[in-house]
Every structure is written in structure tokens, then in C-alpha cells.
Amino acid sequence: MTNKERSKRGLTTNSSCPHCSNIEETVEHILQKCKKIKGVLRHFKDRVSDHTPIHDFKTWLVNNMKDESKGTEFGIICWCIWKQRNEEAMDEKTFSGVGLIKRIESCFSINTNVVANVASIEQGTRTIRERRKVEVNLDSTTAVSILKGEGDPNNRHDILILQAKELLRRDWIVKINHVYRECNYAADILACKGHEVPFGTHHLDTCDPNLMYWLNYDVRETSQERDVLRKSALTLESESSISGKSSQLELLESQILQGSLLFQRSDTHRDLSGVHSGILTEHKNEVWFVQFSNNGEYLASSSSDCTAIVWKVMEDGQLAFKHVLSSHHKPVSLVAWSPDDTRLLTCGNGEVLKLWDVETGTCLSTFGGHGFIVSSCAWFPDSKQLVCGSSEPGKGIYVWDCDGKEIKSWKGRRMPKVSDLAVTPDGEHLIVVSDKEIRKFNVETSTEQLILEAHSITSLSVSTNGDYFIVNLNSQEIHLWDVACKWDKPLRFVGHKQDKYVIRSCFGGLNSSFIASGSEDSQVYIWNRRDPKPIEILSGHLMTVNCVSWNPRRHRMLASASDDGTVRIWGPSKLNSHSK
């Protein structure tokens, strides 16, 4: 709703645009004339037929919407602008021109692979008219289904599809196959670089060393499935070629034999929406947190819609709705499973902590309140005690039993506000992060060790073996430290985007060999613990990915939570019923 309309309804006393002083905010102003939006329209001038409006507002809308090639793109631009304005008005979010452009571009990028496949068929068939038998091999299952008659799901490229189908219907014998792409990692690297530069043609003065490595690899190899496993093996193989087989390579081979490492890369995000790799859409707003239970049989998600949802992981890999937990009055920022998986904690954003029975979905207890605002929580290994941190300086940290009895506390002026905390698997130490500080407390003796970071910390995760922990920083880095605090400096992981929101990461795979993280560019990033650069990037979400969780028992199942209101389950086309 515009400020003009909100003013009419008594919802505000100011009908002006927040960015343009003394100018009334109308629909026309938001979509066309606001000084902040004009820059966005100029950025997408090749997708908007009339990006410099000289007509009246209605004519401008009609001219752009009726354009056969750009109408849908224009509609996406308008929708994203309108959503951004609503977030400013209702959620008090700060306007970000760069963020808005990234959001729009993420919507445009969805069908790139499919369009490229269909376009290649349309062009290729024109060049082989003299042949009578045609065999078409495509690496996109979506493009294959479209050409076999199922149509374009988004109806954005009907003309191109019809042209390709018309050529395929000629007096030819045509066979359309889905195949795994021939090794073309060098092209992938160039394609990724293309997303980092403005539209147009760009000349590379020097060849990227990574590009040369993968060019040589492409020449040697034949077609294969494109998966994280292969890339991980190559990285470790190159590292160990001089000194002989490393222990890490032996570990990787062990994982290959056990069939436990990660998941195969699907051709498009649509291939991840089937039975075993799905999209959960039951939340009504942004999804902020997601976490698998310790036995891997359940998944819990929490949202700004003030609810948490518990899902059951079925034997065949599907997820079934179990409970919706709806007792909070504010957004639910995170959840925490008890080690025995019988109970679940939900943490309201700037609110209280609630304890739930997983089997029945009933609320058992409420913690906090009366001036103690809970910001984070965790369990001790016995499932009988829990710990909570407060977002208010001086309030500190409390340890309670499940009946609400205080067991221990750290509080006072010296205690800063707590951003996140975790208990080590042995229950001996409590790790707490606040702003740029990491504190490790000995639970028994209350002694502490301090680690200082150069940038603000937003989240914390401890490996299942208790040897390491990772922290996400707003400097767009993830740092890995040893729990024993013997390292002088951390291992650093880069590539994802984070400078504004709370982004959460996790360990995964056998022996916590991998790290996964959300990102503000709507993608999920995967690293091998030995490599500072991502070995895989998963696309599919439309907005910021806030949190990820790796199934601790099914090592090829990963969940991600996003501001687009969905939870995505990543995995191969056919998941094992259980990892051995």
C-alpha cells in the first residue's frame, strides 16, 4: 500500500515518498518516478522497452507489458520494486538499490539453462537440413520435457519453443535424449565469471590459472555426471600427487565406497523438485532457520510468520508435514533439538523461549520474559539441561533444567549481548559469540578463553566430533577454529555473499569434512574443509538463503531456508533410504 493510501486510512500522517521529499507517494511514483527506482530502471534498460517514460503512466505500463519478448521481464521488475517498497513500509527494511537489482536478476536467471538448450536446437536444426535422421542430446531434463510436448512451465519463450518444435516435425526421424553434459568445466568457470561483470562483451587479458587447469582436465576426460564428489576427488588428487596419497584422499575413497558423500548435481533447479529433492512451501513468510534432528529422522524450520514446523523424513527420502508450532507472538528466529530428539526449543525474535514435545506438538514450558530477552539457545548432552543467551548487555547466559530451575549463570556488566552460542558434544565447554568476540567457557570451572575477530560475527556452528567450530562474519568470510583454541589464526572460506543479514552455516558429510552456508545472493555454497573456495554452488532459491542444515545420518541430504518463503531439500534424484 502506498503512503498516499495509508494516509487516507489513518495508518500514517505522512503521504510523501521516503526517498523524495515532499512528493506524494503513489503507485506511479513508486514504479516509475522515484529517484531511487529510476536508477534501477536504467540498469535494466535492455529488458524494458520504454525505460525513459515519456507517456502517461497507464500507456507506459501497457507498452511494456504487451512486448512479446520483454513483457514478462518487465512484470518481474515491477513486482520486485513493489515488494521492496512493502518491505520498507511494513518490515522497516532499508532500501538497497544493489539488493533490488540482485533480487531482480535472480528471478531472470532461473531459466537460463533451459533457454540455452532450446535455442541451440532451434539454431542447430537449421544447419543440418540435408540430413534425414537427427539425434538430439540435451543435458537439461526440463528442455527435454518441453521439446517432447509438455510446454514451457513459465510461458516465457513460446515463440522460441514453437520454432524449435516446427523444425523437429519436418521430414526427419528425430530422437531426443537426456545425457549428462560432456566435461566442460572451463565453460562453467567462464559462465560464472559472466555473472560477476556488467552486460556486454568482455575481453580477458590473462588466462585464469583455474581455467587452464580445467581446460587440461576437459581434454583428458569423457562425459560424466557433474557432481561434487568428482571435484573433491580431483582437488585432493592434485594436492597429493607430489607427496603420495594423503590421509584425506584415503578418507574420500572410503566415503565413495560407503556411498555417503554429498549428492549429485542436478541439471537444473527443477530437477530438485521431485519426490526426493523437494520444495516445502507451508510457511507464510520468510524462513529464517532450519535444522535436522540428531537422528536425521526429522526436520524443523522456523519463520517470520511466527511459527515453526516439524517435518518427518520418510524412508524413501520424502518429507511429510508433522506439526506446526504456533504459540509465539513474534518471528521465530531459531530452533534447537534435544540430543535425544524428543523435545524441541523455539526461540522467538526478541521474545521468549518455548519447549515443545516433538511427538504431540504440545508446548511444555516457556523460558525467559520478565526483562530477559532470549537471543539464542542450545542443549547439554543429557537432554535435561538447556542454556540461553540474552540479546541485552549484562543479562548474560542462563542454564536451566527443563522445569525452569536455574542451574548456573554468567551475568553482570562484563557480559556483552549474546549473538549465538553452542555447547560442545561432550558438554564440557560453552562457546559464545558477541559482536567481534568468541568466548569459550569451561562449564565446570567457569574459566574462559577469548578469541578476537576483526569483523562482526553473526552465527556459530560446532562440528559433530567436537573438534572444530565455524563462525560467519559480515566481511563475507567463514572462519574455522579449533575448539582446543591452539591455533593462532583460523582457516578462511570465501565466495558467498554476506554483509547485511544473519547468515548461518554448518558442517556436513562424514567426519564433518564439508561446510555449507547460505548467502545473500540466493545460493547455497559448499566447501571442502581443506579448500577456501567453494567446490559447489547450488541455485534455486529466489532470495537470501538464511540457513542450511546437513542431515547427520543421510550425508547426501541438505536443507536450506530462504527469504523466498521456502525450504529446499537438496539431494540426488534417488536418495538411499539410509546412509550406512
Image: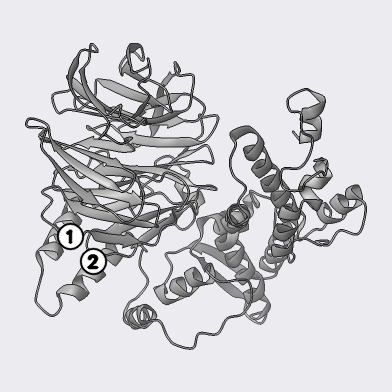
Q: Quadrant of the C terminus?
A: top left
Q: Residues within 10 Å of mark 1 (few under 14, many from 20)?
A: many
Identify which residue, 539 or 89, lies in the foreground.
89
Q: Residue furthest front?
A: 413
Residue 313 appears in the picture as rendered = no
- The x, y position of residue 535, in whole percent, is 33, 63
- The x, y position of residue 195, in whole percent, is 53, 67
Report the side of 512 relative to 454 (left or right). left
Q: Which residue is label 2 attached to?
A: 233
Hey, which quadrant is residue 8 in on the image? top right
Identify which residue, 269 or 23, lies in the foreground.
23
Q: CA distance from mark 2 to mark 1?
A: 7 Å
Q: Amino acid at mark 1?
A: Leu
Q: How many marks?
A: 2
- The x, y position of residue 235, in whole percent, is 25, 70
Q: Are marks 2 and 1 in contact (CB under 8 Å)?
A: yes
Q: Residue at x 21, y 75 (%)?
A: 238
Identify which residue, 75 or 403, lies in the foreground.
403
- The x, y position of residue 472, in whole percent, is 34, 50
Report the side of 187 relative to 414 (left or right). right
Q: Secondary structure at mark 2?
A: helix
Q: Which residue is label 1 attached to?
A: 252
Q: Secondary structure at mark 1?
A: helix
Residue 33 appears in the picture as rendered = yes
The answer to whether residue 129 is above or below residue 333 is below
The answer to whether residue 402 is above or below residue 451 is above
Hey, which quadrant is residue 213 in on the image? bottom left
Q: Amino acid at mark 2?
A: Ala
Q: Quadrant of the N terminus?
A: top right
Identify which residue, 196 or 488, lies in the foreground.
488
Q: Residue at x 55, y 55 (%)?
A: 142
